[in-house]
Amino acid sequence: MALVNIMEEIVDNTIDELIGYSGCCDCDHCKEDIKCLTLNALPPRYVSTTKGELFSKLSQAMIKQHSIDVNIACLNAIEFVKTHPKHN
Ligand SMILES: [Zn+2]
């Protein structure tokens, strides 16, 4: 068994969805920064999961429940990284 913060998975998916429209650089470095900022802005949601179990089990209801907050946090983070890129 392992504890997993399902917010990480939701945030990963949301960043991939939003970054394309944002005009923000989508290199690994920037994505990592965005993920970090977004996760810090959101409360973690831990679930216990058995090893190897995939997040396909993540319920749509659970994603929907958090999607507005996650979207807002993601957009804020993307906007920040876009205007404060750490690399050239
Ligand atoms: Zn970048």
Image: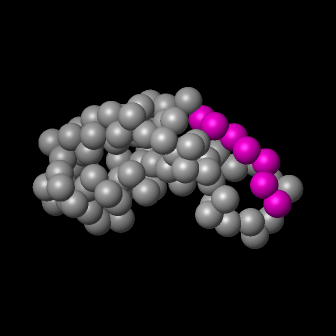
Is residue 81 visible to us here?
yes
Which residue: 35% across, 47% down?
34
Task: Give the farthest residue toward the front.
Answer: 61
Q: Is residue 26 above or below residue 67?
A: below
Q: Please name the colour scheme applied to the rendered image.
A: one colour
Residue 42 to residue 60: above or below: above
Q: Residue at x 27, y 40 (%)?
A: 75
Residue most extreme to the right: 1
- For the point 49% across and 32% down, the residue is 42
- Picture quadrant where residue 78 is located: top left
Spot occupied by residue 37 in the image (x, y as percentages of width and height): 40, 39
With 12 as the anchor, is 21 left or right in this view?
Answer: left
On the rendered structure, is 60 left or right of 87? right
Does the rendering let one see residue 33? no
Residue 9 on the magenta span:
no
Write down the region rendered in magenta.
44-50
Front residue of 10/35: it is 10
* Residue 53 x, y percent position in the rendering: 74, 66
Location of the C terminus by quadrant is bottom left
**Total of numbered circles in the picture?**
0
| 83 vs 86: above or below | above
On the rendered image, what quadrant is the N terminus found in? Answer: bottom right
Name which quarter of the figure residue 41 lies in: top left
**Residue 68 x/y as whole percent:** 39, 34
Identify the residue at image location x=32%, y=57%. Answer: 17
Q: Position of residue 80 (x, y in %)?
A: 23, 38
